[in-house]
Image (tube, grey):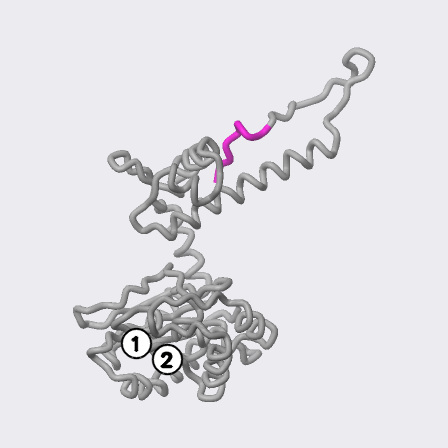
């Protein structure tokens, strides 16, 4: 990723031994300041990529500037650098920016490194063949869950949680599993600090109710979502455990409400648990 050099002072190639009474080299503090500035600009560029990831239809430089709380000139220069390096695409007609193929390439490498593509995909496909419904593999990314792989069922009505999607932990089956089966310290922090945003009228927004839900999930070994994240959809998820007994991923079946009842969905838990055990044995553990 290239950083716009307008924001950096050029450093001389060499310093003469004498210049007038004495030549002075830049102080360590000035070098450190330049390094801090360079790092700060990289962070701002990465922040723009994250914002673009939340905008499937793209965004203008002005919109990104407002959302990132950056000066327009800085945003414009960074977008220019990102576009030149292939991390961002520019659509002249709409004057909008989109994530570029370079991001996709890096994402595929990460997915392959963790086994989410080559190793996990055949297992997800087998689950979908048996259920006829979408199978989703997710991991925790901070206070969200990240969809890392998904296999759609043969039905025309499809689930919209595609790879790369960030979703709420408190309102999804995959998210609740990742909270319930996290290590003790992480689980406590998430239960007490997550923003329990009401995504639908069925979302859990009460802190005590959320604590109760997480304890229930720990006792029974799976989580459900019944129109809490999206009206018309329900899902069931199980943990994928690491060697310490904590969930480093979650595996789910998701369906439209008109196709399967909650009881029929829960009946798929043994199938999901068997697939999760296979994933646990085969995937590099986090």
From the viewer's side, name the closer residue of 18 and 3. Answer: 3
So how many labels did they put on this image?
2
Q: Is residue 64 above or below residue 221?
A: above
Return the residue at label 2. 224
**Where's residue 109, x and y in %?**
42, 56
Give the percent coordinates (x, y) of residue 88: 38, 42
Instruction: Report if the CB atoms under discs 2 and 1 are less than 8 Å apart.
Output: yes
Task: Give, as a single range, the part of the protein colored magenta.
Answer: 1-8
Magenta span: predominant SS is loop
Residue found at x 31% / y 51%:
56
Residue 123 vs 60, above or below: the answer is below
Within 10 Å of disc 2 (Cα), the crowding (few <14, some 14-19, many 20+) is: many
Q: Which residue is rendered at x = 32% and y = 38% of the image? A: 90
Height in image: 9 above or below 222?
A: above
Work out whether residue 234 or residue 140 is closer to the camera in this orientation and state it.
Answer: 234
Write the residue at 48% across / 47% down.
47
Q: CA distance from mark 2 to mark 1?
A: 7 Å
**Rendered residue at 40%/61% (across/down):** 166
Give the numbered dot on residue 234.
1
**Residue 164 drawn in magenta:** no
Q: Position of residue 54 (x, y in %)?
A: 38, 53
Percent coordinates x, y for residue 128 in the rendering? 27, 76
């Amino acid at each position: 990723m290239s950083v716009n050099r307008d924001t950096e002072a050029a450093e001389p190639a060499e310093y003469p031994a004498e210049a007038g009474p004495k030549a002075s080299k830049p102080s360590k503090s000035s070098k450190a300041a330049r390094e801090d500035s360079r790092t700060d600009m990289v962070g701002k560029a990465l922040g723009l990529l994250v914002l673009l990831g939340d905008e499937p239809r793209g965004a203008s430089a002005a919109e990104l500037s407002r959302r990132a709380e950056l000066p327009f000139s800085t945003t414009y220069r960074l977008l220019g650098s990102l576009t030149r390096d292939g991390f961002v695409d520019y659509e002249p007609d709409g004057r909008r920016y989109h994530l570029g193929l370079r991001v996709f390439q890096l994402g595929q490498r990460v997915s392959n490194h963790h086994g989410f593509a080559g190793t996990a995909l055949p297992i997800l496909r087998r689950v979908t063949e048996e259920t006829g419904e979408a199978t989703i593999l997710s991991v925790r990314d901070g206070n969200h869950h990240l969809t890392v792989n998904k296999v759609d069922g043969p039905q025309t009505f499809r689930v919209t949680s595609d790879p790369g999607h960030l979703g709420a932990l408190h309102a999804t089956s995959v998210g609740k599993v990742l909270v319930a089966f996290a290590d003790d310290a992480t689980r406590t922090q998430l239960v007490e600090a997550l923003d329990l945003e009401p995504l639908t009228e069925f979302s859990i927004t009460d802190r005590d109710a959320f604590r109760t839900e997480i304890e229930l999930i720990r006792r029974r070994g799976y989580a459900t979502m019944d129109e809490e994240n999206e009206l018309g959809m329900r899902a069931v998820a199980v943990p994928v455990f690491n060697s310490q007994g904590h969930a480093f991923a979650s595996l789910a079946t998701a369906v439209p409400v008109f196709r399967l009842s909650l009881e029929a969905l829960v009946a798929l838990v043994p199938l999901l648990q068997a697939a999760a055990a296979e994933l646990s044995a085969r995937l590099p553990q986090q």
